[in-house]
Amino acid sequence: MDDEASLQSTIARARDFDPDAWEALYRRLHPGLHAYARRRLAAPMCDDAVSETFTRAMEAIGRFSPRSGSFDGWVFGILRNVVLESYRKAGRHDHDVPDLASEEEGPLDRLVAGERAAEVRAAFEQLAPDDREVLELRILGRLDAEAVGAVVGKRAGAVRMAQARALSRLGDLLGERQR
Amino acid sequence: MSDSEHDRDDELLERLRGELLGEEREPDADRIAAVRMQAQAHRDARAAGPATRRRRPRRDFLLGAGLASAGAALGVAGFAIVDDDPAAPPTEPISLSGAPTGVRANAELINHTWGVELVLTVSGLRDGSTYDVVYRSASGDVPAGSFVGVGGEQLCRMTGALLRDQTEAIEVLDQDGATVLRSTLS
């Protein structure tokens, strides 16, 4: 059974609330979901956000339709709503949202070795927020352009353009800094 | 964009994935146990039929991994554990107004660090009708879930991502959006 067939089988069992299926889905999606949350929420809130996402997914699994998009994209869309609600709950206080451009070492620090890490991180944070989110969903969720579009409310073509723009911008920023 | 450019972008995205994920860590065992318990509780509730809908798993089942793990240790559903938990958090009784004829209700709030939990005991709601619970605040409304009326008495635990000190009112709405119950909070 290939990966896609295996996933569809797991989703089918999840509709019947098979605990093994839900554990498999949780383990499969946790790394990407947690990383997405980590880039938007204070660290102590991330686990709760992912858990809340699965709570909602479990309650709504009966309404999930593959015709509307991928399962992974559907779950990332739920997490995105959870994060936005968290912002609202916090009154959009800055202290509840990590400063992505802080001096704390971030994931991009490890993109390249040593001295270029800070440059790469700074470049990533200079992307337009919408473009950055497109890249994060493409990267962390491994979502295709159609799925990302469903999550953020854009057409697939617009997502591809945003991705190309963001990658080009990253390259330009890093190139400029190297000169 | 050419195929080779697509391939190059895909390669770069995959390379970035490893970096953005950082150090992958195993999900907490408590969280996994909570997921499994909630799935089982859904399955049990469905197998038991509509008469037991009142005992559907709590909305906040996964939010408190500690509670969930306590349930796992005892081998019973988490929503049953909380009621008997001697370390249960303090509750705040609230008054409800606007109850239609034949509907009786009382409610308490639990002030969690992550939001407010409404513990609602209500009877007389239309069997099979769906009701939504909404928390009102100065910055907008926050949904706190929905439930199905069973006609007789039912206990519903609803949670919303709004802090207690920001929660100005709580309303239970019927399928048409009309207010069935309301509590104005101080």
Image (cartoon, helix red, strand yellow):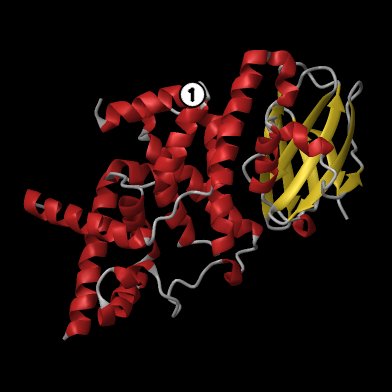
Res. A136 in view: yes
Quick one: B145 or A22, which is closer to the camera?
A22
Res. B176 in view: no
Quick one: A12 or B184, which is closer to the camera?
A12
- Mark 1 neighbour class, 10 Å CA radius: few under 14, some 14 to 19, many 20 or more: some
Left or right, B42 with respect to A176, comes to: right
**Taking B46 as reference, is B25 above or below it?**
below
* Residue bearing the label numbered 1: A15
Left or right, B43 with respect to B151, comes to: left
Left or right, A176 with respect to A105, comes to: left
**Type of residue at label 1?**
Arg
Q: x, y percentage for residue B172?
A: 77, 35
Which quadrant of the figure has residue B155? top right
**Taking A139 as reference, is A90 above or below it?**
below
Residue with the most extreme front position: B73
Residue at 27 percent of width and 60 percent of height: B16
